[in-house]
Image (spheres, helix red, strand yellow):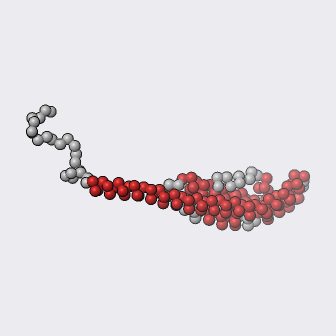
């Protein structure tokens, strides 16, 4: 639309308040953004490092617990394996499986202790990789516990598939 010279013009832009944001308010908002952004990044970085150390400690404890739990079972397995492989006597096999069963009894205690420690590790939902690793440790310890519990009930379970060694931890 053409307007006559000197006639008042209509504003075609929206205004904030009467004059928009003042330069002082704009400067304050800019400074707050420039300070808060890096501060938030630094805080997250520090927290992530703490979480990473805690998950590493969880994984180390899980490894030690698995070694402690499996040590008597592996020793007994090495002892009975040649007899089981060479013998067809049902009574001798039962005796060998009984030895394995007794070696597996009570071996889950260190796994339970490590699992409880891993479950206590707090990780922010934002740090998915650390949460997945912590949860992987818990699942691996559960699998180890499940197998050793079955073995403590029936020594013949030694012939079944063994769980993977702390995969995902």
The answer to which of 22 and 11 lies nearer the viewer is 22
Q: Is residue 121 left or right of residue 16?
A: right
**Vertical arrangement, residue 20 with respect to residue 94, above or below:** above
Q: Position of residue 112 (x, y in %)?
A: 66, 65
Instruction: Give the image quarter of residue 89.
Output: bottom right
Quadrant location of the C terminus in the rendered image:
bottom right
Question: Can residue 48 be spotted in the picture?
Answer: yes
Q: From the viewer's perspective, is residue 114 above or below residue 88?
A: below
Residue 94 seen:
no
Q: Which residue is at a point 67% across and 52% down the rendered structure image?
A: 167
* 127 lies above or below 107: above
Residue that appears at 64% across and 52% down: 168
Q: Residue 118, position in %: x, y?
A: 61, 62
Q: Position of residue 105 (x, y in %)?
A: 75, 65
User: Residue drawn 25% across and 54% down?
Assistant: 22
Q: Nearer the viewer, residue 116 or 32?
A: 32
Q: Percent position (x, y) of residue 4? A: 9, 35
Q: Is residue 79 left or right of residue 65?
A: right
């Amino acid at each position: 639309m053409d307007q006559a010279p000197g006639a008042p013009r209509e504003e075609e832009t929206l205004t904030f308040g009467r004059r928009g944001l003042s330069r002082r308010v704009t400067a304050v908002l800019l400074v707050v953004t420039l300070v808060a952004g890096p501060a938030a990044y630094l805080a997250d970085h520090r927290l992530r490092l703490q979480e990473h150390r805690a998950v590493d400690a969880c994984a180390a404890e899980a490894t030690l617990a698995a070694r402690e739990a499996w040590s008597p079972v592996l020793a007994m397995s090495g002892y009975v394996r040649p007899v089981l492989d060479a013998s067809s006597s049902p009574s001798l096999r039962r005796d060998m499986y009984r030895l394995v069963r007794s070696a597996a009894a009570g071996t889950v205690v260190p796994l339970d202790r490590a699992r409880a420690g891993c479950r206590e590790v707090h990780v922010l939902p934002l740090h998915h990789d650390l949460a997945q690793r912590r949860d992987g440790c818990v699942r691996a310890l559960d699998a180890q516990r499940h197998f050793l519990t079955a073995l403590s009930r029936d020594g013949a379970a030694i012939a079944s598939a063994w769980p993977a060694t702390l995969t995902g931890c």
